[in-house]
Structures are given as C-alpha cells and as structure tokens.
Image (cartoon, grey):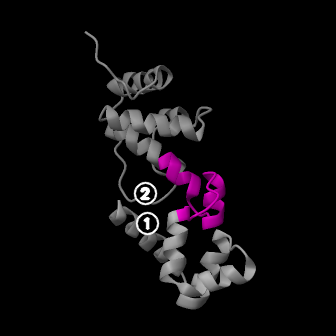
Amino acid sequence: QQCPLPNVNGRTLKWVIDYLKHHAKHPAILLDKPLRDNIYNLGLPQFDINFIERGRTQQDIYDIIAAAMYMDIPSLVDLGCAKIASLIKGKNPKEIRETFGLHGDFGPKERQAVKTKYPFLAKAESESLTLTDEEIRQRLDEQLGHNSAAAASAEASAAMQQAK
C-alpha cells in the first residue's frame, strides 16, 4: 500500500529507511536535552555518528530532520539537531553566521524598526551613509549595554510578527 510523503525527496527517504532498518534491530537512543556536548561525546552508537556524518551537507541534514519530523521519528530528529548544534558549539556569533551563510541579522523591515526604536542609530547612519549589521550591534551595545543587539533584534522580529 502506498503512503504519500510529499515533503520528503527520494534520496532523503532512502537515508531514513536505512536508519530505520538499522534501528529495527538496535534500538535508537533518545538524547537528553539540552545537549551538553557535541555528537562525539553523547554516547551515541558509531552507526548514528557515521550515518549523520557520512558526506552530508548542511542541506542534507536539514532534509533528514524535516523528514524525521514529518514521519515522527524523534531519535532521528534528535540526531540531526545534535549534528547541527555541534556545528555551532563554542563559536561566536560571527562564526555561526559564517557557518550558516547568514550575511546579516536585520532584514529591511527589522532594520527600520530598530532605527525607529533607537533614533541614535538613524542619526549615526545618516552621518556615515549606511551602518553594517555589525556596526548596528556594536552601537547598540555601546549605548544600551552588552548583548543589547540581540535583544533589539528579537524585539524587532517580535514587532514584525505582530504587524503581520
């Protein structure tokens, strides 16, 4: 009997089936959360580490996570998320942005919301033409205290969600 899986491509489905076949004989481990370490130090079976590492791109891992979520396979969701978490563990925000190819924290609407809430940024930007996201974060931290850029970004995102 057919079971439609419109959100899962054939290659990813094959990987998921391989994972399920193995774990039909060897029960999968559900990971404790929050994760305390990278995937190599979580007590995972070697099969799981090899499975998630085996020449996988970030997109492959995202596809595996999405398929596992769609098909309700918690151990595979955990494994994929643990791999992604291990990519950022111990990195600073700049390194994390580089890892995931993120080129800016603020979209155009978020940037405008932050400048509206914090007029000193609009003034600084008019004086130096355009501020980079890094300069916005730095000026927020200088004016409002450490880690304020993250809070401002979160506030801007929340304001954008409310506006929708």
Q: Residue at x 34, y 44 (%)?
A: 30
> Mark on residue 133?
none
* Residue 86 among magenta residues: yes
Residue 3, position as x, y percentages in the image? 28, 17
Q: Quadrant of residue 107?
A: bottom right
Residue range (magenta): 82-108
Q: Looking at the picture, does residue 24 appear above or below residue 28? A: above
Q: Which mark is residue 35?
A: 2
In this view, the residue farthest toward the top is: 1
Query: Residue 93, position in %: x, y?
Result: 60, 66
Left or right, residue 102 beside residue 17: right
Q: Quadrant of residue 28?
A: top left
Helix, strand or loop status at disc 1: helix
Residue at point 68% right, 70% down? 132
Name the quadrant of the N terminus.
Answer: top left
Mark 1 = which residue? 157
Q: Secondary structure at mark 2?
A: loop
Q: In the rendered picture of this protein, how many numbered marks are placed on residues?
A: 2
Instruction: Tell me where residue 154 sits by quadrant.
Output: bottom left
In whole angstroms, how far apart are the C-alphas of marks 2 and 1? 26 Å
Q: Seen from this angle, which residue lies furthest right? A: 128
Q: Give the residue type at disc 1.
A: Ser
Question: Label 2: few (<14), some or many (≥20) within 10 Å?
Answer: some
